[in-house]
Image (cartoon, rainbow, N blue to C red):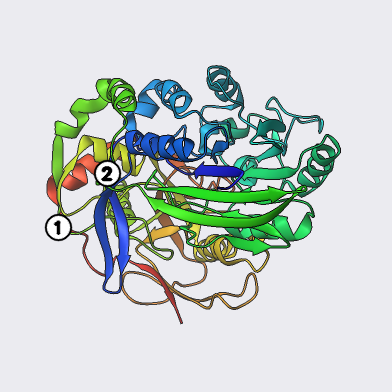
Amino acid sequence: MPNLTLLQINDVHVYLEPHAEIVWTGAGPETARMGGYARIASIFKAAREENPGGVLAMDCGDSFHGTPALVESKGRVLVPVLNALGLSAMTGHWDFAWGPEHLRDLAGGLDFPLLAANCHDGEGRPGPFPPTESFEVAGVRVGVIGLAATILGEMPPQFAGGLRFTDGIEEAREHAARLRDAGCGLVVVVSHLGFPQDCALAEAVDGLDVILSGHTHNRVQEAAECNGTLIIQSGCHGSFVGRLDLQVEGGRVTGHRHRLIPVTNDLPEDPAMVRLVSEAVADTAAMRDRVVGHTAELLHRATTLSAPMDDVLLAAIAAAAGTEIAFSNGWRYGAPIPPGPVTEHDLFCIVPMNPPVETVDMTSAEIRDLIEASLEAVFSRAPFGQRGGYLKRMRGLTIDAKIENPKGLRTQAIYGLDGRPLRDGDIHKVAFISRQGVPSRYDRNRTELPVSAIEALRKWFSDNDRVAAGCGRARLV
């Protein structure tokens, strides 16, 4: 039996109940019914029965965001659910959507700390969240460092609320040494930096035993090892639980076994958690009964360059704004919607924060700069140059790109809907939602329309069930 078992969930995005999830096959994406906190609770309970007193369970963030029940309550319905899981610590990203003060209020109701060692105020002093915690587990003193998403400062201003978020390298180095000096035989990082960034962190910082990684939704089947550090990440939407069993002797890991556990329908549901989840979703449950339309194809966000769920979102935005060109951010969150009815609940899972549709005038050169910045953010050669998310979603444009080229030189050509290259000097009215769709530095005739993303989607689904081919996308050449 191992001395210590680490359990991990990450990027659940408050999918409280079982839901459709992408399952990849040789023929392409399919869906299976997966997830749900009641089944996650049963997995946690089984691990604790196997290793009594030897289990730590961590949440790597993106929990306080995503589905209608969470948005309606601004996170409050999740607090008793997370407490019932018996978590030891967590960190955050979209959890900051209503600002640091609101998150601190939510964290005050938790039975465990929300850690963010890389969070600082405007003067460089430590932020409002503790950097570390330590635990005595199965005869091993475990030091835990929390690292929140480094990109929070680049999101809408209310997320960071004036706080500054670093890459965490210096903080991890300092706190790892301090925890070792305090007698910790194991140092664990609970991170929302992203898998490539966590690999770079491990290479840069000696003395980290384990990084529990989040943000990039990787389904890591075998624990990666970088500079002696074990790194795991466990998918998204609560469809998988990561379990890392460790043998620790003399202050070092002498053996390990990792399992990526699918949260499937054949698993039992914990009765107490079933009741908590039912209470959490009660106020928004009726949204599942309100059918707004149908889809003839599987809608998902599981691919890097473009995805059918965002093709629908962009079609709705463009129709609402009366434009050919539309942009949206390359969000990863949002469980797939299988062919069939689409409900009001589904719409709020596609775009939980429901921003307004906006338009702005952009030159051909500005569109190229926007696309180049997105290509760099996804395919940067430097891990911390990768800012998270997939390629910016686009409608009305086709991009030829060489991702192997250096920064600023990847875009080979940009074509409009007529198949012709965009002409230098032309100005194009484009539609978008959220500052991440078109950053605020592009402000020529920026206009907020009296229609929200959800309203645009309702209208689109009332008239359509399939996105026309050729709406635009990036292709690698």
- Examine the image and state in which quarter residue 229 appears: bottom right
* Residue 25, x across and y down, in percent: 30, 69
Q: Residue 450 versus residue 26: which sits nearer the camera?
A: 26
Give the number of the disc on residue 19: 2
Q: Residue 129 versus residue 471: which sits nearer the camera?
A: 129
**Could you classify mark 1 by the number of other residues whose Cα lies within 10 Å: few (under 14), some (14-19), or many (20 or more)?**
few
Q: Earlier in the sequence, mark 1 or mark 2?
A: 2
In the depicted structure, whether residue 111 falls above or below residue 238: above
* Residue 334, x across and y down, in percent: 36, 46
Q: Residue at x 56, y 60 (%)?
A: 223
Horizontally, residue 360 falls left or right of residue 127, namely left
Q: Say what amino acid the circle numbered 1 marks.
A: Ala
Marks counted in the figure total: 2
Q: Residue at x 31, y 60 (%)?
A: 23
* Residue 298, x across and y down, in percent: 22, 58
Q: Secondary structure at mark 1?
A: loop
Horizontally, residue 457 falls left or right of residue 178, namely left
In the depicted structure, whether residue 262 falls above or below residue 396: above
Q: Secondary structure at mark 2?
A: strand
**Could you classify mark 2 by the number of other residues whose Cα lies within 10 Å: few (under 14), some (14-19), or many (20 or more)?**
some
Q: Say what amino acid the circle numbered 2 marks.
A: His
In the depicted structure, whether residue 430 falls above or below residue 403: above
* Residue 432, x across and y down, in percent: 41, 48
Q: Residue at x 64, y 40 (%)?
A: 153
Horizontally, residue 149 falls left or right of residue 166, namely left
Label 1 close to label 2 by CB (< 8 Å): no
Q: CA distance from mark 1 to mark 2?
A: 19 Å
- Examine the image and state in which quarter residue 91 appears: top right
Q: Residue 294 versus residue 460: which sits nearer the camera?
A: 294
Mark 1 — residue?
Answer: 296
In the depicted structure, whether residue 372 falls above or below residue 191: below
